[in-house]
Image (cartoon, rainbow, N blue to C red):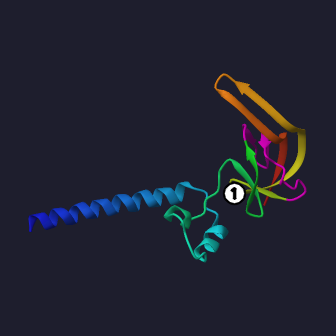
Amino acid sequence: MKMEIGFKILWTLVLIIVFVCSINWIWTRQIDVKETILGFFKKEVERPVDWIATRDENAIYQNGEIVGNVTAKVDETEDKLIFHEICNTSKLNQELLFEYRREKLRIIEIGSIIGQENIVTSSGSEIKYNIIRNVVCEKVK
């Protein structure tokens, strides 16, 4: 009897820990609702983590697809965001709205456009493509 009660208490604690960790994960991630719902209709899910589609918080999106990666500081005011650098923007349509961290944005001004930049340091090298810098965007409600 004592062993059974101990086993039940142990399993209850394990389930509570899993539940709390799951709730924490859900509330601390940016969830892509559309992709999550579409994912439920797929025939096969590779990993349980893939059941809920999340978004990269350092990416910009158009039509649910990543069209750029934010690689530097972002300044924010009440109605604008200023991206100091966005890379890999070859698929970005600058005329259309895009999304960044749940905000819908429209590009107002681009400071500079660079095709490729090679960065070499003692720890290695990095190549950035399709870079736009000092991008001023207005928030769209």
Q: Is residue 92 above or below residue 5?
A: above
Indicate whether residue 86 is drawn in magenta: yes
Expressed as whole percent of the image width and height from the top left, the position of residue 118 reads: 79, 31
Q: Is residue 8 above or below residue 58?
A: below
Indicate whether residue 15 is drawn in magenta: no
At 58% from the left edge and 76% from the top edge, which residue is drawn?
Answer: 43
Q: Is residue 136 above or below residue 24?
A: above
At 49% from the left edge and 65% from the top edge, which residue is drawn?
Answer: 48
Viewer-closest of 31 and 140: 31
What's drawn in magenta, residue-wise? Answer: 71-96
Q: Quadrant of residue 91?
A: bottom right
Left or right of 81: which side holds 30? Answer: left
At 40% from the left edge and 59% from the top edge, which residue is drawn?
Answer: 20
Is the N terminus in the top left, top right, bottom left or bottom right quadrant? Answer: bottom left
At 45% from the left edge and 60% from the top edge, which residue is drawn?
Answer: 22
Expressed as whole percent of the image width and height from the top left, the position of residue 24 reads: 47, 56
Query: Which amino acid lies under the numbered mark 1 shown in the image of this protein?
Result: Arg
Viewer-closest of 51 and 105: 51
Query: Which residue was labeled with disc 1?
Result: 102
Expressed as whole percent of the image width and height from the top left, the position of residue 66 reads: 74, 55
Left or right of 88: which side holds 121? Answer: left
Viewer-closest of 29 and 76: 29
Left or right of 37: which side holds 6? Answer: left
Q: Quadrant of residue 8?
A: bottom left
Q: Quadrant of residue 44?
A: bottom right
Is the C terminus in the top left, top right, bottom left or bottom right quadrant? Answer: bottom right
Left or right of 117: which side holds 19? Answer: left
Q: Pointer 1: residues within 10 angstroms few (<14), some, or many (20+)?
A: some
